[in-house]
Amino acid sequence: MTGPNKAKLGFWALLALVVGNMIGSGIYLLPATLAPLGWNQAAGWIVTLGGALCLAAVFAGLAARVPRAGGPYAYADAAFGPVTGYTAAWAYWVMTWVGNGAIAIAVVSNLSLIFPVIGTIAGLPALLAIAFVWLLTLVNLRGVREAGQVQTVTTVLKVLPLIALIILALWFVLSGAPRAPDPGIALSGSTIATAAGLTFWGFLGLESATVPADKVENAARNVPRATMIGVVLTGLVYLGISLAFALYMPVDEAARSPAPVADFLGKTFGAGVAVVVALFAAISAFGALNGWILVQGEMPWAMARGGVFPRWFAKENANGTPVRGHLVSSVLLTGMILINSQKGMGKLFEFIGSVSIAAGLVAYLLSALAAIRLVGDDRRLTAAALVAAAFTLWAEWGLGWQANLYGGALILAGLTLYPLVRTAGSSGSAAGQPG
């Protein structure tokens, strides 16, 4: 465990972890993916923001009631026992290291706009993605203070182009600038569900503060605050970006853009801005990758401490870092990138991202159900948990059968391994407790 002589995350670093894990590669790429949906994209963001706020309330409430490390695992375990806890943990762990593949590819994809030669050499994008994974794995192995410092700096940098885009759109509104033509795409429940399934990628990580809770200063206060404030700030940025594109960028133009945020700003500030925004987008994805690598190492540690994963993963170094969880997660991530390296960067990002969301939503659903059981005396939190549970099921439906098939297969694979990986001893109560 992290002792008093080991560095911990303060509130601002924790807030940067939450915001930085949510604002990553997605917001720089999603406007192009969502453009063909017309105004359904804005509706999807609004619905997703509502679902994310309910999930944030769930995690904030659970963090105050169950101050244990492990996030979704800790809560599902406390509510339903080790098997359900293991299921939530495995689904969440799959989401993290699979999703990190998409984020690493996004770093390289944005750098390829600055250095086009990257895309011309077969295998180079995959190798660069792997290099970034291991660079940030080494940063995280040095401890949470170093990882928190990287996260704080990259979070500040990554939001600058997004804020600039929102300010530009506000200026368009105030100056009466001509708006993009209405695409004439009708609002429909199924299309909004599709948009919500995609936009939820932008909110993955809202629970990040709950995972390393044992490494947080005054966790009972700071984890709920960072979670709620982080989701609100991130949601406002996303909604502002969505409305800007819906109002001032034609659908066909946004849909075919490889760098929609850069193109939006470039129409006013010149084509040269694309290179600058691509650099900020790469920094954004790099920061998200750093935060998610922190999380992917903590989850096997929490599972091992709870007795549902080999105790080998519970080993920490002198900095209080779960070295073995980091190394195994990054090895799996490396293998996944190599296996799928023949796919183009865009297709690889879309495929890995959708599978990651499908697996992660299972962990979110189990967390919402855990809240209903653990805090049933709190009517408002119970209501938020019910809405959050319904939202996760709706978002799964919106993702489509292929993503759910692959995500479900990975979770089932984990369940078949449960009898083999569960260790003797504690049923789970040790997770996150002093030791």
Image: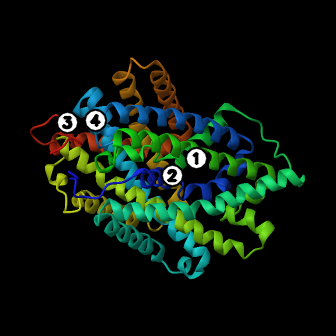
Q: Residue furthest left?
A: 424
Residue under the image location 73 percent in, 47 percent down: 243
Residue under the image location 52 percent in, 26 percent down: 387
Point out the tag, 4 or 3, that comes first from the N-terminus. Answer: 4
* Amino acid tagged 1: Leu
Mark 2–mark 1 Cα distance, whole angstroms, equals 8 Å
Disc 4 target residue: 85
Disc 1 target residue: 233
* Amino acid tagged 4: Gly
Point out the tag, 2 or 1, that comes first from the N-terminus. Answer: 2
User: In which image quadrant can residue 132 be found?
Assistant: bottom left
C-beta proximity under 8 Å, tags 1 and 3: no
Element under disc 4: helix
* Amino acid tagged 2: Val
In front: label 2 or label 3:
2
Residue under the image location 45 percent in, 53 percent down: 12
Disc 2 target residue: 19
Mark 2–mark 4 Cα distance, whole angstroms, equals 26 Å
Q: Is residue 179 visible?
A: no
Mark 1–mark 4 Cα distance, whole angstroms, equals 30 Å
Count neighbours of disc 4 (C-alpha within 10 A) and say few if under 14, some if 14 to 19, many if 20 or more. many
Q: Position of residue 56 (x, y in %)?
A: 48, 37
Element under disc 1: helix
Q: Is residue 278 left or right of residue 389?
A: right
Q: Position of residue 87 (x, y in %)?
A: 30, 38
C-beta proximity under 8 Å, tags 2 and 1: yes
In front: label 4 or label 3:
3
Mark 2–mark 3 Cα distance, whole angstroms, equals 30 Å
Q: Is residue 247 left or right of residue 111?
A: right
Count neighbours of disc 3 (C-alpha within 10 A) and say few if under 14, some if 14 to 19, many if 20 or more. many
